């Protein structure tokens, strides 16, 4: 499963908003979302909401008086003290990795084989088209590939199952139609035999009457 909290954290980091995972989860819950069941669309919406939230929080904090500790002139002039007083540098922004079509197809074929799912070359290409081109890291890439392979196999199995059901229904309908046809044909044959039998009896009666004369 994709780590959407990490994805949101990375996006906020690019906007110079550094928040811990715990803080982000609390903010997501306060916004009315379940952090364990986020979707792609919700991640996009939450990112925008949290950007606005933390910008407002930062603006509110900036208006509060910040007590400044008294630093003696001698202390400031001490060697190395200027480096200690400097604010820590911001963490390096996380950049997403870009995956080529060949890499996607190679991993799809490998993961499908490990899962015991047989995919043709055409099917591998088809699955690859449903996988994005960029990810936060390789773990996210692997997770999405596995999800795509399993979803494709389920879809293919559902289609095959539906075709089997349709074929059975078609065969049953044809069998019922054939039975109706046979019943109708046998009925006509019985009527014909009865008619011929009645005619034979009538003819026999006429012949018998003739010979009596």
Image (spheres, rainbow, N blue to C red):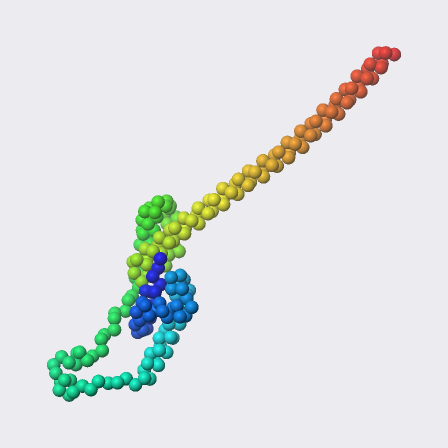
> Height in image: 89 above or below 193?
below
Q: Position of residue 148 (x, y in %)?
A: 38, 53
| Image point (29%, 60%), residue name | 137
**Residue at the extreme left of the image, as rendered:** 79
Q: Can residue 113 be seen in this view?
A: yes
Which of these two is toward me, 120 or 171?
171
Q: Position of residue 202 (x, y in %)?
A: 80, 20
> Height in image: 71 above or below 21?
below
| Image point (58%, 35%), residue name | 175
**Residue at the extreme top of the image, as rendered:** 212
Q: Is residue 164 left or right of residue 47?
A: right
Query: Which of the 4 quarters of the picture holds residue 179?
Result: top right
**Residue at the extreme bottom of the image, as rendered:** 73
Q: Can residue 101 be seen in this view?
A: no
Query: Which of the 4 quarters of the picture holds residue 133?
Result: bottom left
> Height in image: 195 above or below 70?
above
Q: Position of residue 131 (x, y in %)?
A: 37, 56
Q: Where is residue 141 in the image (x, y as percent from the top left)?
A: 32, 57
Quarter of the image that includes the N terminus: bottom left
| Image point (46%, 47%), residue name | 158
């Amino acid at each position: 499963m994709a780590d959407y909290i990490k994805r949101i954290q990375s996006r906020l980091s690019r906007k110079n908003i550094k928040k811990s995972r715990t803080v982000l989860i609390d903010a997501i819950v306060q916004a009315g979302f379940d952090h364990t069941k986020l979707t792609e669309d919700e991640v996009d919406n939450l990112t925008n909401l949290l950007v606005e939230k933390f910008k407002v929080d930062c603006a509110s904090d900036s208006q509060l008086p910040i007590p400044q500790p008294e630093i003696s002139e001698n202390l400031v002039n001490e060697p190395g003290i200027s480096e200690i007083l400097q604010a820590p540098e911001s963490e390096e922004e996380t950049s997403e990795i870009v995956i080529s079509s060949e890499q996607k197809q190679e991993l799809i074929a490998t993961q499908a084989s490990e899962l015991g799912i047989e995919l043709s070359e055409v099917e591998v290409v088809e699955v690859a088209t449903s996988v994005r081109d960029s990810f936060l890291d390789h773990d996210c890439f692997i997770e999405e590939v596995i999800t795509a392979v399993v979803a494709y196999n389920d879809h293919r199995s559902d289609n095959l199952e539906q075709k089997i059901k349709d074929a059975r229904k078609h065969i049953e309908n044809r069998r019922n139609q054939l039975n109706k046809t046979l019943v109708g044909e046998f009925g006509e044959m019985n009527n014909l035999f009865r008619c011929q039998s009645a005619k034979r009896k009538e003819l026999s009666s006429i012949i018998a009457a003739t010979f009596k004369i």
